[in-house]
């Protein structure tokens, strides 16, 4: 066997030329290529998120491409953790691809690495394995919608002039300031690493860098008074500066943080610069962890103090509460502030909303423009969609194939997808459109310390739901379906799904079903758990649709 | 809400009358009723295996029945751990029912019981939850085929006159003697509980009861010489009598045991009768466990000694090896004898064989007779099927709806199912036939201490496979599909599937696909793991079919 070719760069094919036997297969192939075009380390097949991959190895990658090119309309390709293992004859309405990735019994990291070394598995990382990654847009809207939920809850749906105090400007955390600015607000982001803030300034995620809290506060207050959006990076330790701000009586409107609390060895202890922390970490691991945890507890205590003063404070998925509790903080104190899913995102889940997205397979930016317009038309009167689309088209660059993320809900997704299919049918778009979603969706994930934390019925751990989502989407004629494990090993199950509009009547038939099942089972799950909004939606009394389940 | 009605007895409807909108729905309804007709505690919805249920509670049971009656041909009913949660419009080729049962993150028994108390889950127990239980036939063939594999491996495919020394005549273990007699052989079954052996005699599972090993050996040798099948129960402790037999130089042909080793508090220590053990257990739990483990180690050492003399010795899924190792026996000594799946059943898995079964929905025993005949015709020349069908129809009574279990393999299942569908089409059978299988099938289960123990590629823990099986069967137009957890909590994943022949052309189309995917992915999995037989089958060079994957 000759060595498989390593491609250092892959670009998704654009335009009207088919390499496969149908547009469904071609669309899925381009989604795979689009993943690679957006990839952090394409030569290693790593798409994003550390080690999230799109194929087991290069041999598998080439075999997948070849299989998709040869696949008949009534066949299904089977992919096991990034390796294509079989093609079966199914039928024309069956998925083109079925996948299962990173599923391991009694999993922990050690077991995973061992099986990965044996070439038996790979890491799925949400949208990497199912070929649904679209670049950095997704993270930004996650934060944007969290802030939107806060705006609605507390600020009369308007964050202009409001101040968001947060920390951590890293790979994910760096997007917080952009999301706040999209809301017209002001962000103060504390990061212990000067270099990181400077890097964010280069990409316009940050407008200013300062070295004292007083300066940051003064700037923020000025921008707030003028109702001007502004992103200020402050070099400093989150615990120190949060405490200082509280003592000085500074009252921001919203507080959170995205320091790497889930991994205390990365969290920088008070009194250390990033470089000093690096040296400390190497010299004395145990001492480092102790110091990091002490600092983290101080940070959380400051956040709690603000919470008790009525400020909107929440945990943004960093595990700071759990880590502080595990480090000896009494349970009740550690769990003072809410997690963001339970507090802000779950009401969206109840409406079947979540990180829905579409990708224009032609590669033509005009297709994105037209579908953005269409989204505005279809979701007219829905402030969430209207605001996001308007801001996104203005602020967000196109990365690889033109794509849009948008938290549409049950009912909207179907109306939109069917309308897109009509546009293609009429020749108004220059190619198919692939609909997918991140795994942080209403009915697709169970993770008891994150998406399904603190469910009303106590069913945080029940993982029947994502499996039902997968089976039902398959029954609902989706085009690609994936069951994955992820996150902390052994602590989450989720599904990925792709549904294609190619302008055919068949696509109308398929989209009608799977656009209903995918978000519908999310609504059902929340209705079963006792959420009133979800019950209303299921009974056809929701705000977005009068369709019932 | 009025209290749901408790039915103390449910009988599956027989005959040609439809209560549902189509035969697919009616067939599934009758399978559910058939589960109940075979149930151990129907009033509690418990089908078998301790707490394996067919519905969450009576309200759910009635709701399932009602839903199946109302379900349209292009709709799919969604069942979450025994509770019907939604009906979605899908399409005519989609499954009638999708299910997920007992799936729980980071599961252990305590978590399970807690969630069960909250009415959020129930225990699936292999064929109970997906409505595929057919009575005691399944267990018998499991043992029969294990013995068949040994016969082929070592005894020129003939066990007449051979002696099987074993222990444990309990709920499952009690079937061993029947399976050995179906092979024309002689079984000596040691059980510490006289009452249990007497109970087996009442049901003709046991022919004789004796109180000393010498008597048993004498009887066994006599029957062996005359080539007469015989089942002898000996009252005694397995450790004591296995040691005694070895010391006396008695050489049986095959040795195993089905004492409750996986649960040492049920294992009876040497020197105690069943009643004395009961009293000891209550009085001194810790002392009991110590004594039980010491006895168990002696039992395994005796089995190992026989193994070293060249006798065919194996573990039959009781965990005796693991328990002895955990009780301090050195790993290498504890793991001397092989497990039965790795040693005998896996080669069958490589051919896509496993506990395939069919149920005659008309209730007419004639349908079973005709399908038995058809199985013999279709699988002509396959000694496994030929022998089993001939013996089964002679020895096994009909329980509830007439059904047959038969370890058919890849290729055979499809040919058979299509031929059954033709018989129905021609009016030669008086109703539809439902095909299903136990979860101990080639491609449907991962359990690292049982079905997927000791895989050639070290992938014992990789659980992508059952999920792929489920998605693929759904893509392959099966009629019911279920993803379940089971066994020791958190240590196994498996899938249940039902496929229906109702004499229509559509059924031909569906069966063609799903009879290929279900066992086909099992073959692929074993081929991927490096088993030569499976590679041959996948390449169309198998013994049962020249179809390739
Ligand atoms: N809510 C969500 O949907 C979501 C999504 C992705 C990531 N996360 C979580 O967000 C956290 C950050 O992720 P990331 O990818 O940005 O991490 P990262 O490692 O890229 O960046 C962390 C940043 O925090 C800074 N930092 C560390 N300790 C500090 C301290 N004590 N004070 C001030 N700054 C400090 C570091 O200098 C670094 O710039 C993680 O815990 C991650 O799990 C949440
Ligand atoms: N291989 C398979 O497919 C399979 C299937 C089902 C069960 N099992 C395993 O088989 C075992 C038995 O299951 P069961 O349902 O028959 O259990 P059970 O509890 O119904 O019966 C166990 C029997 O063993 C006897 N016994 C206990 N200790 C003994 C000793 N030291 N010496 C002699 N007899 C002793 C008891 O008197 C009892 O009759 C379990 O470990 C179970 O997990 C294997």
Image (spheres, coloured by chain):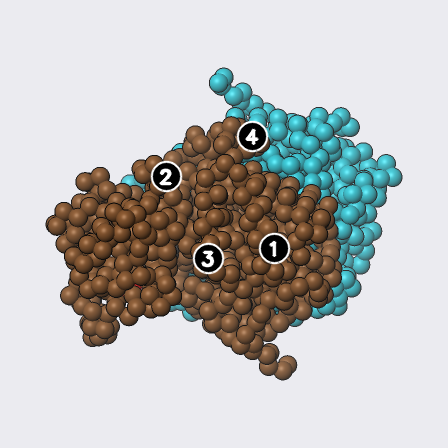
Chain colours: A brown, B cyan
N-term mark: 2 or 4: 2
Percent of width and height locating residue A343 = 34, 41
Compute the Cα span from label 2 to label 1: 31 Å
Secondary structure state at the residue bearing disc 3? loop
Q: Residue at x 25, y 67 (%)?
A: A193
Give the residue number, with chain letter if any, for mark 3.
A396
Compute the Cα span from label 3 to label 4: 33 Å
Q: Quadrant of the N terminus of chain A?
A: bottom right
Query: Comparing marks 3 and 4, which lies closer to the viewer?
Result: 3
Query: Would residue B121 be seen by someone viewing this image from the given angle?
Result: no
Compute the Cα span from label 2 to label 4: 25 Å
Mark 3 burial class by Cα count in 10 Å: few <14, some 14-19, many 20+: few
Q: Residue A157 shows which numbered tag?
A: 2
Q: Please state the chain letter of the residue tagged with numbered disc 2 in the rendered image.
A: A
Give the residue number, with chain letter if any, for mark 1.
A367
Q: Is residue A118 above or below residue B196?
A: below
Secondary structure state at the residue bearing disc 4? loop
Question: Who is closer to the viewer here, A288 or B213?
Answer: A288
Q: Is residue B480 above or below residue B539?
A: above
The residue sitting at the top extreme is B2
N-term mark: 4 or 1: 1
Determine if marks 2 and 3 fall on one subunit. Answer: yes
Q: Residue at x 46, y 69 (%)?
A: A40
Question: Who is closer to the viewer here, A543 or A202?
Answer: A202
Q: Please state the chain letter of the residue tagged with numbered disc 3 in the rendered image.
A: A
Determine if marks 4 and 1 fall on one subunit. Answer: yes
């Amino acid at each position: 066997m000759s060595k498989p070719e390593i491609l250092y760069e892959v670009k998704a094919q654009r335009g009207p030329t088919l390499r496969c036997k149908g547009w469904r297969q071609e669309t899925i192939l381009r989604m795979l290529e689009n993943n690679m075009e957006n990839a952090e380390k394409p030569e290693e097949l790593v798409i994003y998120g550390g080690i999230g991959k799109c194929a087991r190895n290069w041999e598998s990658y080439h075999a997948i491409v070849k299989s998709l090119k040869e696949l008949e309309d009534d066949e299904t390709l089977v992919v096991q953790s990034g390796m294509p293992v079989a093609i079966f004859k199914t039928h024309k309405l069956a998925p083109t691809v079925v996948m299962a990735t990173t599923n391991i019994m009694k999993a922990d990291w050690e077991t995973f690495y061992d099986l990965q070394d044996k070439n038996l598995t790979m890491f799925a990382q949400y949208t990497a394995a199912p070929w649904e990654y679209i670049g950095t847009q997704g993270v930004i809207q996650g934060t944007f919608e969290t802030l939107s939920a806060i705006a609605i809850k507390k600020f009369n749906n308007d964050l202009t002039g409001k101040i968001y105090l947060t920390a951590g400007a890293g790979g994910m955390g760096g997007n917080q300031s952009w999301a706040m600015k999209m809301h017209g607000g002001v962000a103060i982001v504390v990061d212990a690493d000067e270099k990181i803030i400077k890097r964010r300034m280069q990409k316009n995620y940050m407008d200013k860098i300062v070295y004292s809290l007083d300066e940051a506060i003064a700037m923020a207050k000025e921008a707030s008074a003028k109702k001007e959006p502004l992103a200020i990076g402050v070099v400093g330790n989150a615990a120190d500066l949060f405490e200082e701000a509280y003592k000085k009586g500074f009252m921001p409107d919203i507080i959170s943080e995205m320091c790497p609390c889930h991994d205390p060895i990365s969290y920088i202890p008070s009194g250390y610069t990033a470089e000093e922390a690096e040296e400390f970490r190497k010299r004395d691991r145990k001492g480092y962890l102790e110091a990091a945890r002490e600092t983290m507890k101080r940070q959380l205590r400051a956040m709690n103090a603000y919470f008790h003063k009525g400020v909107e404070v929440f945990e943004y998925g960093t595990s700071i509460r759990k880590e502080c509790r595990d480090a000896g903080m009494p349970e009740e104190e550690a769990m003072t502030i809410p997690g963001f899913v339970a507090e802000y995102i779950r009401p969206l889940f109840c409406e079947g909303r979540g990180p829905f997205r579409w990708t224009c397979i032609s590669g033509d930016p005009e297709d994105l423009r037209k579908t953005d317009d269409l989204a505005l038309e279809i979701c007219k009167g829905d402030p969430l969609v209207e605001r996001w689309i308007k801001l996104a088209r203005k602020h967000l660059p196109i990365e690889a194939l033109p794509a849009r993320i948008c938290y549409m809900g049950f009912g909207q997704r179907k109306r939109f997808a069917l309308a897109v299919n009509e546009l293609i049918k009429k020749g108004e778009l220059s190619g198919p459109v692939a609909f997918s979603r991140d795994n942080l969706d209403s009915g697709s994930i169970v993770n008891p310390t994150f998406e399904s934390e603190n469910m009303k019925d106590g069913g945080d751990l029940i993982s029947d739901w994502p499996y039902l989502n997968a089976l039902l989407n398959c029954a609902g004629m989706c085009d690609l379906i994936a069951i994955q494990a992820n996150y902390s090993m052994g602590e989450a199950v989720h599904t990925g799904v792709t549904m294609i509009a190619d302008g055919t009547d068949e696509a109308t038939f398929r989209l009608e079903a799977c656009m209903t099942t995918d978000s519908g089972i999310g609504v059902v799950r929340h209705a079963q758990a006792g959420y009133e909004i979800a019950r209303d939606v299921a009974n056809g009394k929701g705000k977005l649709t009068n369709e019932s389940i």
